[in-house]
Amino acid sequence: MKVKRAPAADGTLIRDLAAVLAGEARDFSRHATADTWAAVRWHGIYSLIHAAAREGLVSGISEDLATALRRYARGFAIMDDAFRRQTERLLAAFSGADLPCLVIKGQAIAVLYYDHPRLRHRVDVDVLIPERRRTEAIDVLEHEGYLLQGHDRTRLTTAQFVATAPGPSPQPVKFDVHLQASNRAVFGAVLEFEAAWERRQALPGPGASAWAPDTIDLILHSCAHRLAHGRNAARERLLWLFDIQQMAATLSDEERQRLVELARARNVGGICGDALRVARDLFGSPYDAAWIEALEAQRKEEPSWALARSGKLAWYWSDLRGQRGAGDKLTYLKETLLNQLR
């Protein structure tokens, strides 16, 4: 998902929104309605703020803003039901073909870690399949009537394609079918399918064949996604940070230690520690400082940390270096140029 530039917002406004997400009451009368609405939309939290307003945690907002929150929240509740139904349909098709599939990112997090999935805004559904089963997955989806995009090209930087579900819905339901968890070379090993499949957890709701990565794998992937898709200001999106907060709050002491071990083994300890530190500061999460320090202990040696505040050129160079062989590097350069021209 591409995220546009963040709207200008007073730091106090962001703090007030974060406090509401953490369950604290706030008066928004000191903030301009336009500023509040722009921030709520950009951070993807209008359903959460609407729910908090109904609980009496939000005061001092205009009637126009209250109406907009209610309208958008209701609209997404309808879309959430479409996501649920279409996810069940896609997973049933894959299961019938004995094709393993993991639901990842927003859809899995919404179902597993939110009071109700409709509170977690998303624009599509992400699934991860084994790269070696790509052709089989395409055959299944074409047979079931999905409209496919990006599946007939060799794309080194985008190891995924889009499948739009057939059938009626408030708006088209799109699935990002990932062959790798991330298109960024530096995150190539952050969530490997076979290992994640062995540790998978059941995903309630969409059929008996629904699975998601375990909590630790989802946290690692979310921290990587926050950086890969949220360079600069976008990494501070409250929705992404709240996801991480919600998942981290469920970990036992043993699981926290396991997160440290896996994050450092996969060279993402620094960016995981950074995400948890920011979430702690915003939401008041009671994370032990020693836990975050343990995650960050090797960050200076981690390529992902070196890219944490880099610009586009550094990311392009990292992706180029991550390609296998001169032929793949040349193809990557051609594809990158074409993507920029588009």
Image: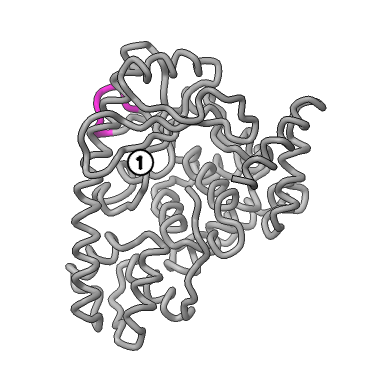
Residue holding disc 1: 107
Residue drawn at the location 77% of the way across and 31% of the way down: 330
Vertical comparison of 45 with 191: above or below: below
Mark 1 nearby-residue class (10 Å; few <14, some 14–19, many ≥20): many
Residue drawn at the location 34% of the way across and 88% of the way down: 30
Vertical comparison of 155 with 6: above or below: above
Q: Where is residue 341 in the image (x, y as percent from the top left)?
A: 64, 46
| Secondary structure type for disc 1 | helix
Which SS does the magenta portion mostly show?
A: loop
Q: Position of residue 84 (x, y in %)?
A: 25, 36
Residue drawn at the location 37% of the way across and 20% of the way down: 141
In this view, which residue lies farthest toward the bottom? 30
**Mark 1: which amino acid?**
Gln
Q: In this view, does 307 lie to the left or right of 210?
A: right
Of residues 270 and 255, the one drawn nearer to the viewer in this rendering: 270
Residue drawn at the location 32% of the way across and 27% of the way down: 210
Of residues 24 and 127, the one drawn nearer to the viewer in this rendering: 127
In this view, which residue lies farthest toward the right? 326
In this view, which residue lies farthest toward the front? 341
If the image is split into quadrants, where does the C terminus sit?
top right
Magenta residues (range): 204-210
Q: Position of residue 264 (x, y in %)?
A: 66, 43
Q: Is residue 142 left or right of residue 325?
A: left
Q: Does the magenta stretch include residue 308?
A: no
Q: In this view, does 57 lie to the left or right of 157?
A: left
Q: How is the image coloured?
A: one colour
Of residues 293 and 59, the one drawn nearer to the viewer in this rendering: 59
Q: Position of residue 108 (x, y in %)?
A: 36, 39
The tally of labels here is: 1
